[in-house]
Amino acid sequence: MRLPAVATVLLLSTTGCLKEISSEERLDRETQYASAKNTPDAAALAKLNCEDTTEGLNQARNVNRPETDRVLSYIDLYTSLMKRTATFEEAMTRNPDLHYTEGSQQLVAAKETCIQQTADVRVEFETYVRELVDVPTVQEIKGGNTVTVARLDFNTLRQAIETLALDDKETLINRVSNAEKKVSPAPGEEPSGGGRKRGK
């Protein structure tokens, strides 16, 4: 008589254990496992660094290049730095063991460098964008007449504002749109122009 009772208890206990993990919890576990599996490991992170910004910054700072090209250089560099920083932060959050593996000090240092470089480039990039929004056009003499010319392609300037995701983004974009309306289009040219070289 005891055997069936014991079997019943075991069956109830087993059934109870199976019910402890819901389908949502199981899905969460599988999702976390898949995320961890796709997260870059220490070897992959070791190949990432944010110290190679010299060339990109030189191009962005070169006053002899068209302003549109300079803004595009800032966009490319800043976007690249943000992606690298996000990769470090995501990997080290999903896999805390990366903080304690061999070479972890180098990984942490590389991550901090990315964070700092991204912040520094952002400040410089934002300063330049705000300067362009403040003075988006210049006056030129054409055919004996003074005309208003765009300093750069306005769509590129809008792209830069979107990339920076500034708090006053909508205000800045409206100012760009207002400036675009004041540009004097030359025959066969788009109102926004293709960008000009910035003189000292």
Image (cartoon, grey):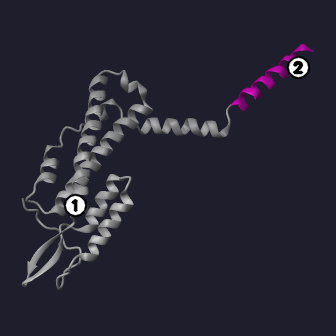
> To which quarter of the image does residue 62 belong?
bottom left
Q: Is residue 177 left or right of residue 64?
A: right
Q: List x then y, in percent, for residue 112.
A: 29, 32
> To which quarter of the image does residue 156 belong?
bottom left
Q: Say if the magenta span includes residue 5.
A: yes
Q: Is residue 139 left or right of residue 48?
A: left
Q: Is residue 192 above or below residue 173?
A: below
Q: Say if the magenta span includes residue 97.
A: no
Taking the spot 28% from the left edge, 41% from the top edge, the residue there is 119
Instruction: Specify the segment rendered in magenta.
Output: 1-20
Q: Which mark is residue 4?
A: 2
Mark 1 surroundings: few (<14), some (14-19) or many (≥20) residues within 10 A = some
Between disc 2 and disc 1, whose residue precedes? Answer: 2
Taking the spot 28% from the left edge, 76% from the top edge, the residue there is 181
Taking the spot 32% from the left edge, 45% from the top edge, the residue there is 83
Q: Is residue 77 above or below residue 19?
A: below
- Judged from the image, the secondary structure of the residue bearing numbered disc 1 is helix
Q: Amino acid at mark 1?
A: Leu
Mark 2 surroundings: few (<14), some (14-19) or many (≥20) residues within 10 A = few
**194 or 135, nearer to the observer:** 135
Q: Amino acid at mark 2?
A: Pro
Frontmost of labels 2 and 1 is 1
Q: Is residue 91 above or below residue 71?
A: above
Tell me if residue 119 can be seen.
yes
Q: Is residue 164 left or right of residue 21?
A: left
The span from disc 2 to disc 1 (Cα, nearest Å) is: 84 Å
Quarter containing the C terminus? bottom left
Determine which residue is flagged by label 1. Answer: 132
